[in-house]
Image (cartoon, rainbow, N blue to C red):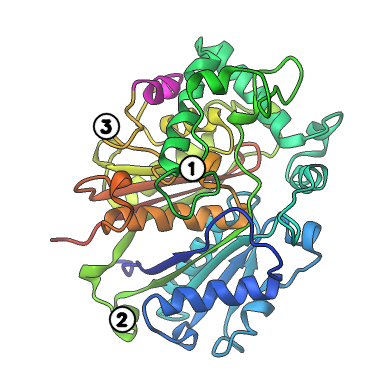
Amino acid sequence: MSKKIYVAAYHQSAFGKLGAVSVPEIVRRAITEVCESIAVDPAVCDLGAIGATCNISLNEQGLLSGLMAEVPGLAGKPLEGVENACATGGQAILAVVTKLLAGWGEVGIAVGFEKMRDDQGKMDGKAVGRALGFFSHPEEREGKVYVFPHLFAEVMDAYMKTYGVTEEDLAYVAVTEYQNAQHNPYAHMRGVTPSVADVLRIEGINRYIVEGLPLKTYDCSQISDGYAAMILATEEGLQRLGRQAADCVELAGYAQATDPLRKGVRDVLRPEGAYRAMQAAYAMAGVSPEDVDVAEVHDCFTVMGAIGAEVLGLARPGEGARYWREGHAAVGGRCPINTSGGLIAKGHPVGATGVAMVGWCAWQLLGRVPAPLQVKEAKVAATFNIGGPICASVCTVLKAPEA
């Protein structure tokens, strides 16, 4: 029987703008602050993994594991950098879990971050778009100015036409998440509360991203700075940390799968790898979709909020948008999704996203999120983190401590 793995600690920065904070300083803060949250020294960690998706292209810095080793207590240990597009954070968690299960140690740290804005907090849309475009197939980026918004505008268009879904149906994803973000102190878009009419109205900042396709500004996630870090441990590791299993969330199920990079050669509306990974995570945890009380999905665009509900098994294919429109994804709904505000309103510092999804779910199961967002008596949580055009998928299931 495999060892049980626990989320022993989680910490993140506010998402949005980090200002004139260097990449080495971001890495240092991420590690030291999560350790400080449970009053341990970084030296207690036996191993680690770190990921940032666009750091070489935007910040000209690679070998992030070496920056981890700059933190006193981590030098000379098995640290690695990982990259799996927007699923990088989830992949960092799995890299740590794999080494813990292999017996390389009992305590590990997973870090994800992104610095996507300059020191004044300004964003170069073309530079970011170009950097993210590298994570698509060369044949599918030709002729596209903003590659990923264009690719997902095509996905949105296909979803609407295939299932008879409207722009208004998908607007409920954004509206629900912006409402949630108002109560999340870490969210990028606090103070912004668009209505369904606002999401649909083309004026001001809200415009169609690609001519002839339905994706609008409010359908898109944010270009954010931010970092997130998590300490994972075996039962023996918890003892060393001075933590009790009764106070920690169990990472009870996890899986990863990757589909071909080109979306044009597969059914992108029913991504095989995503479904396979989610079902494998459920099987490992010994639960079914009906057991899930709260979830975080990778809503880089509103259509992914809908598809994410379907991958989770909360809605049948084509009915994910209705799940949101009917209020089932809202706090107090059947199974709330993205109570954090999601990528659309919480923010999307790409490398941090997968770590933050698992971390927020851990906080939900421990009753530590702000009261208006807290799902009552939540016992099981699920996450669905993707990279690329629904290509790489990392899925997890968490369980609350037993009473």
Whether residue 298 is visible here, answered yes or no, is no
Residue drawn at x 79%, y 47% is 124
Q: How many angstroms separate mark 3 from mark 2 (CA)?
A: 36 Å
Tell me which secondary structure the magenta stretch mostly adopts: helix
The reply to whether callout 2 and callout 1 are in contact (CB within 8 Å) is: no
Per the rendered image, the range of residues in magenta is 317-326
| 379 sits left or right of 28 in the view | left
Q: How many angstroms separate mark 2 from mark 1 (CA)?
A: 34 Å
Q: Nearer the viewer, mark 3 or mark 2?
A: 3
Q: Nearer the viewer, mark 3 or mark 1?
A: 1
Q: How many angstroms separate mark 3 from mark 1 (CA)?
A: 18 Å
Percent position of residue 20, x then y:
71, 67
Residue drawn at x 24%, y 69% is 247
Question: Mark 3 vs mark 1: which is more N-terminal?
Answer: 3
| 274 sits left or right of 25 in the view | left
Whether residue 56 is visible here, answered yes or no, is yes
Query: Which disc, if any, is residue 236?
Result: 2
The quarter holding residue 227 reads bottom right
* Residue at disc 2, secondary structure: helix
Residue placed under numbered mark 1 in the picture = 342
Q: Amino acid type of disc 3?
A: Arg
Residue placed under numbered mark 3 in the picture = 334
**Residue at the farthest left position:** 403
Q: Judge whether 228 appears above or below 314 on screen.
A: below
Q: Judge whether 91 appears above or below 271 on screen.
A: below
* Residue at disc 1, secondary structure: helix
The reply to whether callout 3 and callout 1 are in contact (CB within 8 Å) is: no
Percent position of residue 74, x then y:
56, 86
